Image (cartoon, grey):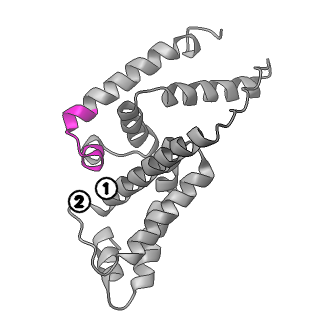
């Protein structure tokens, strides 16, 4: 069934649970991945998406979407994740926590690949917020530029500019790790 058919089923009448279940199964994994790209905490990402889905269920009878269901769910997830970050910042001011130290690199190929993945993840994490969001939505979630623009409430040209900026920054930060450059 299409998103619209599942949304119609969810709104009322017979099959509400089936409509919700279909929406949940279709979007949950991608929404958790998206939330994790913002929060960098898999457990918090799952909690965030569960809150979004619970709110969808609570509002099912009177929900009116001005965008696609996909855009609505990603926007809701983004907003909840950002609210969680704001809350964590306030909490961290009251009780600062120490970050875990980074493991030392090893000559083992598997560890070198893990280090590479960590460097890429760190470089993505250091991108400016809007660049990181656009990059994650495009490369991790597979959204098209028009869907990203709708989700974030920006123009397609802004998405293109932010994506170009993100790729340029990543190339600069990962130059020593790119093929042909050799490992440091």
Say which element carries label 2.
loop
Note whether 68 is above or below 160 in the view shown: below
Image coordinates for residue 75, horizontal then vertical, percent: 34, 53
Residue appearing at x 52%, y 41% in the figure: 89
Residue appearing at x 58%, y 15% in the figure: 177
Helix, strand or loop for the magenta stretch, by majority: helix
Q: Which residues are magenta?
A: 148-159
Residue 88 in which image quadrant: top right
In this figure, what is the number of numbered marks?
2
Residue appearing at x 57%, y 38% in the figure: 93
Image coordinates for residue 39, horizontal then vertical, percent: 53, 44
Say which element carries label 1.
helix
Where is mark 1, residue-wise?
71
Instruction: Please say if the residues under marks 2 and 1 sit with CB atoms less than 8 Å apart.
Output: yes
Where is mark 2, residue-wise?
67
Residue appearing at x 24%, y 44% in the figure: 146
Instruction: Report crowding for label 1: few under 14, some 14 to 19, many 20 or more residues within 10 A (C-alpha).
Output: many
Locate residue 26 relative to residue 164 in the image: left or right: right
Instruction: Report crowding for label 2: few under 14, some 14 to 19, many 20 or more residues within 10 A (C-alpha).
Output: few
The quadrant of the picture occupied by the N terminus is bottom left
Image coordinates for residue 82, horizontal then vertical, percent: 43, 47
Locate residue 123 relative to residue 103 in the image: left or right: left
The quadrant of the picture occupied by the C terminus is top right
Seen from the viewer's position, the closer of residues 163 and 65 is 65
């Amino acid at each position: 069934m299409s998103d619209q058919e599942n949304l119609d089923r969810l709104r009322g009448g017979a099959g509400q649970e089936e409509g919700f279940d279909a929406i949940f199964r279709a979007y949950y994994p991608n929404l958790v991945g998206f939330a994790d790209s913002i929060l960098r905490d898999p457990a918090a990402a799952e909690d965030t998406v569960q809150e979004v889905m619970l709110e969808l269920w609570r509002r099912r009878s009177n929900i009116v979407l001005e965008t696609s269901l996909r855009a609505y769910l990603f926007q809701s997830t983004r907003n909840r994740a950002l609210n969680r970050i704001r809350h964590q910042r306030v909490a961290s001011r009251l009780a600062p926590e120490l970050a875990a130290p980074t493991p030392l690199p090893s000559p083992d190929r598997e560890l070198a690949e893990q280090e590479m993945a960590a460097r890429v993840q760190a470089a993505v994490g250091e991108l400016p917020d809007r660049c990181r969001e656009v990059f994650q939505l495009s490369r991790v979630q597979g959204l098209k530029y028009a869907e990203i623009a709708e989700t974030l409430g920006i123009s397609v040209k802004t998405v293109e500019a932010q994506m170009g900026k993100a790729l340029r920054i990543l190339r600069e930060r990962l130059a020593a790790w790119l093929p042909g450059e050799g490992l440091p």
